[in-house]
Each structure stands twice: as C-alpha cells, then as structure tokens.
Amino acid sequence: MEHDNGKPDSSQRRTVLKAGVAAASASVLGFPAIVRAQSDKIIIGHLTPRTGFLGPMGEYAVMSINLAVEEQNKAGGLLGRQLTLISEDSVNPPTASSKAQRLLERDGAAVLIGEISSASALGIAQVAQRNKKLFMNTGCNSDELRGKSCNRFAFHIEAANSTYVKACGRVLLQDGLIKGKKLYALTADYAFGHDLLRTAKVFVSANGGTITHDELVPTDATDFSPYLLKIRQAKPDLVISNLAGNQITNFIKQYAEFGLPFPMSGFGFDTVAAWGAGADNFAGTWPTTWHHDVNSPSAKAFVAAFVKKYGKPPENQAWGEYVAFRSMVQAITETRSLDTMKLIDYFEKGAEIDVLKGRKGSYRAWDHQLLQEMYTISPKAKGKSKDQWDFLQLGASVPGAAESLEVLAPTMQENACKFT
C-alpha cells in the first residue's frame, strides 16, 4: 500500500520558479534559444514526493529541475518564451492525481515531469492521457507502467525494474551468487516493490537460483531487527533488497550493525540511500541508472553546475529530472512546437538524446522506454574516498559497447504494451 504521511493538502509544498530575464549566453544544456517576441510563459509542471520515505530523493529531484529551468531561461527560454516551473509535493497517489489535474487545467502546464512512486505515476499518466499532455516519468520503475498500464502520453526516463534486475544480475551471476544459491529477499510493500519482486523471481529462477524467503516490509518500517534475526536463522547464500527510499538506508545501517556474514545485494537502488547509510556501513553490489562519476562531457558539465549551485554532487534522481527536461527541450526546439502529438511523433521516430552517458539514448516507439546504459555500484576500497559522497565505486557500463541497448530492456513478451 502506498505511503501517506497524513498531512492535509494545504500544508503540502508548492514552489514556483519565476521566469528570469533572457540572457545571450549559451546554456549548459547546449540547446539554441529561439527568440521570438512573446510575452506569455511556458509552464512546466513538476511532481515529486518531498515527504515520507521517498522524500530524500524528491529533494534532489527539485534541486535538479530548478537548475535545469534556470539554465534554459538564461539561454533565452524556449520558442522565445521564458519558462515558469511549478513544483508540487505529490505525497501519495490520490494527491498526485489531483495535483496533476490542477497543473494542467488551472495552471496550464505544457508538460508534466517527475514522480518517484510507481503507484502515483500510474494516476499521473492517466491524467496526462485524458488531457493529451506529455508526462515524463523520471523515477518510477514498475514494469506495469510500461506494460499493461502503458499509454502513449507517458515517456520513461527511469529504467524498468526488469532492467535493474538484469543489470545487477549479470554481475551476481559472474560472482557465482545466483546459480544453485538460496536467496532471501526483503521487499517494499507497495506497487514498486511487488513489481520488483516479481521480476527478481523470474530472473533468479531462469538462472538456476531460488528465492527461498520473501518478506514484505511496510514503507514506514524503520526497525529491521525482526527481519535480520530471521535472516541469521535462515543462513541464505545471498540477501537481496527490493526496498525503496530511506528503507534502504536503514536496512544497510542495521545489516552492518548486526554483523551478518551473508553477502548482500539489491535490485533497486538510489545513491542518496547509500550516502545516508555512510561509507562504514555500505556493502554489496547494487544497480543504478547513473552516478556523478560517469565519464562523459555532458555528465561532467551537469555535475559541475549542480555542485556550484548546491555544494554537493547530484545523485541518480537528480539525473532523471535533468534528462527529462533535456528531452523535452530538445523535442520542442527541433519541432518548434508545443503540440503534444508532434512531440510524441518526434520521440517515436527514434531521436537520439544526450543522456549524460557514454552512449546516447532514444525512446522506443512501442512502449516509450528510454533505451540507455546502466551501471553497478559497490564500495570503494577503504581510504580511497575523497569526501563524504565518494565511497561508491562505479562499475563498467552495461550492456557492453558491442551490445545493443535493447539487451537489458523489457521485451514485448515481458511487457505487453499496447497504446489505445
């Protein structure tokens, strides 16, 4: 069940970034400004949870989208018009849906960007479809969003759960931790977690392993000792986290405190969760869409701009917001239009997107999933960290340079998406 912090709507955060004065300097985004004398603004609607167990990631999302909009306005905006960002705390699925409707109907948003909760994203996508506006999903992993619940107005920057599982699973197979092994899984008890557990079971079973225990963990759980005691008694070959948000932080911390000898890994992960756990506690192999050590010119430019503004590096949710905005700006610039169907057509024709990685990405026409490289993360050797954020070792990109980006993505057989 989706987490709800119980706060009334009037107390939830809404921030508006006013459009700045146009400047002639080039944007870090690298897109040309199209100057035209128009006084009206383009409204960008942004939704993300800033409270509850997903709140720490939401804060990075807000920082990133603010940076991206500021940069574009300094470069002259879009179509000769400045941008106004309205950022909302989505909180839970009902609130997310109602705020999405308000952003489109009352505020006149041209596009919706954001979200981290898969359950909330489903409602936002339905609102976007009814209003015939784009929804750029930046942080929701559920395969269902790209599968039976897909719609033509939703695009997915975030990787699917099955992609995370395959990316991390490759490394675990190489390390001999799946075939013939017994796995113990802890899973976040909401839409994302259930979907991730389903895809994990498919992968593990197909590769000769067995998930012998799977525990559903409430999203507001902070004490993992009952689960850790069960793990100690079960003596698994590998412990798998299918947790989310600050659940991961608390689990990693307490796993280290218990001193359990069993290897640990995870099929879902966000950098901020590891940062919260700290270098002394972090262990195992985890998948990620992006990390601030990715070696590409656009990634370095983004990291430098983020650090300059906020004094710390961006994490993977910040990356998602930034790439979603880049995608939208590129499509509007190239089509010279805000018409939703023209933007959809632009993406469906396979336009290449700079996704701040070694290889460019593109959106698949049949499910609107961004095809992209993935990575794994593990602890750096002790004493190698330069600062409090520098204890994660970035693994090689997957798939390999000679492989298609389709290798890790859900197949048509796995995710039967049919647009209506």
Image (tube, rainbow, N blue to C red):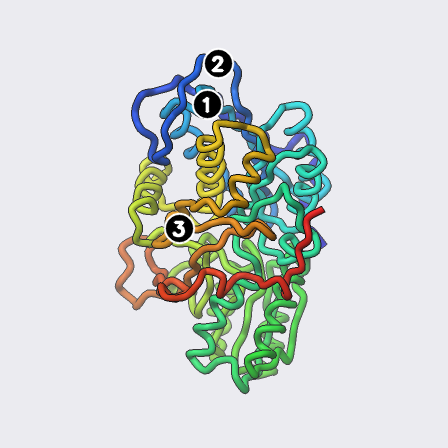
> Gap between marks 2 and 3, in whole Å?
33 Å
Whole-percent x, y for residue 225 in the image: 59, 69
Q: Name the residue under label 1.
A: 79
Disc 1 element: loop
Q: Quarter-wise, where is residue 207 in the image?
A: bottom right
Relative to 313, residue 67 above or below: above
Whole-percent x, y for residue 267 in the image: 53, 65
Callout 1–callout 2 Cβ contact below 8 Å: yes
Q: Which amino acid does the dot numbered 1 rest on? A: Leu
In the rendered structure, the answer to whether residue 161 lies left or right of residue 398 reads: right
Relative to 386, residue 183 above or below: below
Location of the N terminus (image quadrant): bottom right
Q: Which amino acid does the dot numbered 2 rest on? A: Gln
Whole-percent x, y for residue 161 in the image: 57, 61
In the rendered structure, the answer to whether residue 366 lies left or right of residue 75 reads: right
Label 2 vs 3, first from the N-terminus: 2
Which residue occupies 60% across, 40% down?
135
Q: Which amino acid does the dot numbered 3 rest on? A: Lys
Q: Mark 2 points at which residue?
A: 38
Label 1 vs 2, first from the N-terminus: 2
Q: Name the residue under label 3.
A: 360
Pick the residue in front: 238 or 375: 375
Q: Decide: few, some or many residues near mark 3? Use Cα within 10 Å; few <14, some 14-19, many ≥20.
A: some
